[in-house]
Amino acid sequence: MNSNETARSDASSVPPAAAWLGGLGIIPFAGLSLATPFANDVLEARLSFALMAYGAIILSFLGGIHWGLAIGAVPQSDNMLWRRIALSILPSLVAWAALFAPSRISFLVLAAAFVAMLLVDIRASRIHEAPAWYLKLRWPLSCGAVAALLLGTFS
């Protein structure tokens, strides 16, 4: 492997910090979604809301990533910057609104929003607005979050 291939390989490898912290971030999704069906009624409601709130927080975080990518990018047109920043705040607004919906609807809205953010991430990666490794991180984490939120729908 020559130095260019090594650089490309390194550029597409998920940095260990992102891999570890992202992986640890899936633990609340898994733990809450798996514990909720086995809890008594009072605890079940608390665990269900905790899962919903965690989903909303992480969805907001994903929007924040895109805000950072937009403002850290090479200078761009005002229209492009407006589009990217506007898109980056939508996840927070959707997450916040989802917290006021009935539980099942909230979980479905959050799960759909995670899928939508994954599509945004795919596009950002394809047009080089995100690091080369970003999708390798986002795919499993998004799938885990969506699975947990859908499981929460049926708790």
Image (cartoon, rainbow, N blue to C red):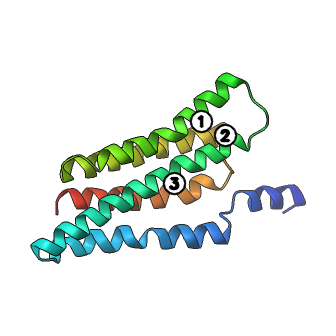
Q: Position of residue 29 (x, y in %)?
A: 36, 67
85 relative to 154 in the view: left or right: right
Residue drawn at 33 percent across, 74 percent down? 31
**Image: 132 above or below 120:** below
Q: Quadrant of residue 82?
A: top right
Secondary element at tag 2: helix
Q: Which residue is mark 3?
A: 61
Q: Position of residue 67 (x, y in %)?
A: 61, 44
**Image: 19 above or below 137:** below
Secondary element at tag 3: helix
C-alpha separation, residue under disc 1 versus residue under disc 2: 6 Å
Amino acid bearing label 3: Phe
Q: Which residue is mark 2?
A: 70
Q: Which residue is mark 1?
A: 85
Amino acid bearing label 2: Ala
Cβ–Cβ below 8 Å for labels 1 and 2?
yes
Q: Residues within 10 Å of mark 2 (few under 14, many from 20)?
A: many
Decide which of 79, 100 is in the foreground and name it.
100
Secondary element at tag 1: helix
Q: Position of residue 132 (x, y in %)?
A: 68, 51
Decide which of 90, 107 is in the foreground and name it.
90
Residue drawn at 16 percent across, 63 percent down? 155
Q: Position of residue 90 (x, y in %)?
A: 46, 38
**Image: 93 above or below 37:** above
139 relative to 69 in the view: left or right: left
133 relative to 97 in the view: left or right: right
117 relative to 104 in the view: left or right: right
